[in-house]
Amino acid sequence: MGSFVIPATAQIDRRRSAFTLIEVLIVVVIVAILAATILPRFSDSTQEAKLSALKSNIHLLRTYAEAYRMYHSDSYPAIIDNDLPQLTSATNASGTIGPAGPDFPYGPYISQQLPLNPFDGSRKVTAVAKAGEKPTGVVGTLGGWQYDASNGFVWPNNPEYYQASP
């Protein structure tokens, strides 16, 4: 049995198929430069998407509060345990919550639960600091939403909103 000899050209080809350290470093530098220029654009897009979702959720909550008011003698839902359960449950004309049916014919206006504040992921509701006035900052530590039961207005309760607002 003869020994098998690898031709010299095959050994050279095998060495050339690997990357050199310099080639790997160049690729890493190029990827780092691309990441440094592209990632801030994604970050801006994420903030814009959150702001868009926030505006949509505010509009929906205000619409639900107005729909509630139409059937409840011009009164808006009340905050109960940092929530607006009168929007997510069946109610009677006085706003009492109960099982859907002839005794509790109104609602629910929202099928499951209040929408999230996309900046902090909270659904909690806190009363505004001064009824009838637009908030100028966060109230409490729960995040979520600020709600004015005197007029049904809803605002975000996260610092990013008030920092970005003019």
Image (cartoon, rainbow, N blue to C red):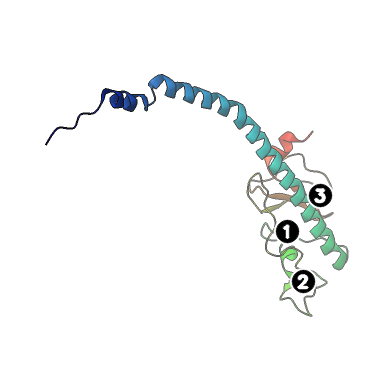
Residue linked to disc 3: 131
Question: x, y (%) of residue 51?
Answer: 72, 42
Report the residue at 64% width, 51% height from top: 122
Earlier sequence position, callout 2 versus callout 1: 1
Residue linked to disc 2: 91
Quadrant where the N terminus sits is top left
Q: Are marks 3 and 2 in contact (CB under 8 Å)?
A: no
Above/below status of 68 relative to 8: below
> Is the residue marked by circle 3 packed among few (<14), some (14-19), or many (20+) residues within 10 Å?
some
Earlier sequence position, callout 3 versus callout 2: 2
Question: x, y (%) of residue 123?
Answer: 66, 54
Callout 1: SS: loop
Q: Are marks 2 and 1 in contact (CB under 8 Å)?
A: no
Q: Of residues 110 and 44, which is closer to you in this image? A: 44
Mark 3: amino acid: Ala
Report the residue at 47% width, 21% height from top: 26
Pair 2/1: label in front: 2
Question: x, y (%) of residue 125?
Answer: 70, 53
Mark 1: amino acid: Ile
Above/below status of 149 relative to 54: below
Callout 3: SS: loop
Residue linked to disc 1: 79
Query: Which residue appears farthest toward the top when viewing the image?
Result: 22
Question: x, y (%) of residue 146?
Answer: 73, 49
- Is residue 38 visible to the viewer in this orientation of the structure? yes
Mark 2: amino acid: Thr
> Is the residue marked by circle 2 packed among few (<14), some (14-19), or many (20+) residues within 10 Å?
many
Query: Which residue appears farthest toward the bottom when viewing the image?
Result: 102
